[in-house]
Image (cartoon, rainbow, N blue to C red):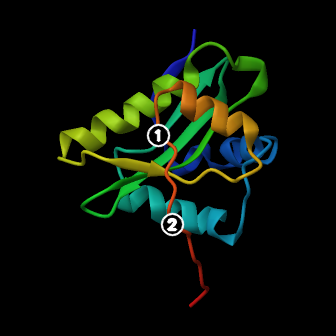
Amino acid sequence: MSLIREMTIEDYEQAFLLWNQIEGLVLSEADSKPNIESYLARNKGFCFVCEADNQVVGTILAGHDGRRGFIYHLAVNPEYRKQRIGHRLVEASLAQLREIGIEKCHIFVLENNDLGHSFWTAAGWEKRSGFFVYSKTP
């Protein structure tokens, strides 16, 4: 049986190992332990892990800007897929966002992440078009 619970920084090492094995999930310096610790502190109550057999087998990072929610790093160990863990993690984060009045949430999925596109489409999320995302390092 798997357990969904709030993510803490103590989960970082296992989460980072999981993220590294997920095709389509790209990591950067933003995913360093100090940065994730800061993210978890700013977004307390929105980020979750799924544990099974005393191991982190799923993660979701979620937060908001006061208007819209954002999801990052939804990841499920391939050996634990098809058990609705991803859906349960998403629902846990969305429930917390709804509780504070956030009614819309976004996730960025890389163009070539076919598995990600399939998951989000099957879960009823709408693919947006008509805009580009620009990034810059300050």
> Which of the marked residues, 1 or 2, is nearer the chain's N terminus?
1
On the rendered image, what quadrant is the C terminus found in? bottom right
- For label 1, the SS is loop
Q: Circles 1 and 2: CB distance less than 8 Å?
A: no
Q: CA distance from mark 1 to mark 2?
A: 14 Å
**Vertical position of residue 78 compared to residue 67: above or below:** above
Q: Amino acid at mark 2?
A: Phe
Q: Which residue is mark 2?
A: 131
Q: Which residue is mark 1?
A: 126
**Vertical position of residue 106 compared to residue 96: above or below:** below
Residue 21 in the image, given as x and y percentages of width and height = 82, 41
> Residue, x 29% and y 44% (percent of image)?
97
> Residue, x 71% and y 52% (percent of image)?
111
Residue 74 in the image, given as x and y percentages of width and height = 59, 40
- Classify residue 14 as left or right of residue 121: right
Q: Nearer the viewer, residue 75 or 106?
A: 106
Q: Amino acid at mark 1?
A: Glu
